[in-house]
Amino acid sequence: MSTHTPPNDTPRLTVSQLTIGYPRRTLVSNISLTVAPGSALAILGPNGSGKTTLFRTLLGLLPPKSGRVKLGDLDTGAWSNRDLARHMGYVPQATNIFNFNVIEIVEMARASRLPWHALPGKRDRDIAMDALQQLNMAAFADREFAELSGGERQLVLVARALASEARILLLDEPTASLDFGNRLMMMNTLSRLKQSGVTIIFSSHDPQHAFQLCSGPDDQTLTINKIGDVAVGTTAALLTPSALAALYQVPEQTLPIFSHSSRQA
């Protein structure tokens, strides 16, 4: 359990008539939703449907082709990188960070909380170590990041996001490289963060993760199919067997049975 309480000033994330893509290619159009503070949003869709591009657009790393993404009262593109990082933490699928050890990488997340040119101090080191401890990675603090497995690197990147004390976390397939035990630990960690009031936005190829994390009254699921059609609604309504079969273009009878018993209130 974390010994540090992040600032509780979470703004609302609002997406209006959003079209995402690149100068010569549109991926997805007409995305509209509001992510309430402390809620969870699951994003599902086949490979190449635009999930990562959506994350990058929500973070202001890519400009919308049309429409708006607002954090509070401002478009995300109007926030400074420093101020945006105080509110939104991002865990990508992969990273090219090398030549640093694990604790240094996690401490980098403290930059937005420090005065200009200040170096991390004892409190920042404690917060970074606490984040690693939450993910059972404290023993790796002095290891070189480049020496870690893909799953271990993913856990370090999640720890870095936790150390930022951002109240909105965006995680692009956070369980993709993890073994069974670490997948369970990751989902339990995200559930605990949500219960503490952190907003969780994540993508996954496992519908069970959406049932587990996104079944509260303010939670939502968003699906994007291969041709860019979008649906937003409750997890139970969107992830029916017939809808999943259509989303992933597989026969309905081949789908596993997803349990609703692990849903979080």
Image: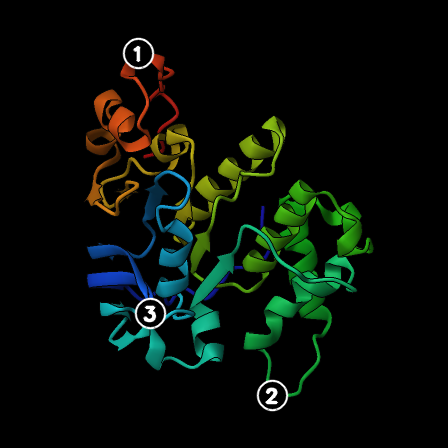
The reply to whether callout 2 and callout 3 are in contact (CB within 8 Å) is no
The reply to whether callout 1 and callout 2 are in contact (CB within 8 Å) is no
The reply to whether callout 1 and callout 3 are in contact (CB within 8 Å) is no
Distance between mark 2 and mark 3 Cα atoms: 35 Å
Between disc 1 and disc 2, the foreground one is 1
Kind of residue at badge 3: Pro
Can you say which quadrant of the picture contains the C terminus?
top left
**Residue 69, quarter of picture:** bottom left
Q: Earlier in the sequence, mark 2 or mark 3?
A: 3
Kind of residue at badge 2: Trp
Residue at 36% x, 35% y: name it. 210
Q: Which circle marks residue 23 in the picture?
A: 3
Q: Earlier in the sequence, mark 1 or mark 3?
A: 3
Q: Residue furthest front?
A: 24
Measured as percent of width and height from the top left, residue 198 is found at 41, 54
SS class, disc 3: loop
Q: Earlier in the sequence, mark 1 or mark 2?
A: 2
Q: Residues within 10 Å of mark 1 (few under 14, many from 20)?
A: few
**Disc 1 target residue:** 253
SS class, disc 1: helix
Q: Tell which of 17 and 65 is nearer to you.
A: 65
Q: Which circle marks residue 116 in the picture?
A: 2
Measured as percent of width and height from the top left, residue 42 is found at 35, 43
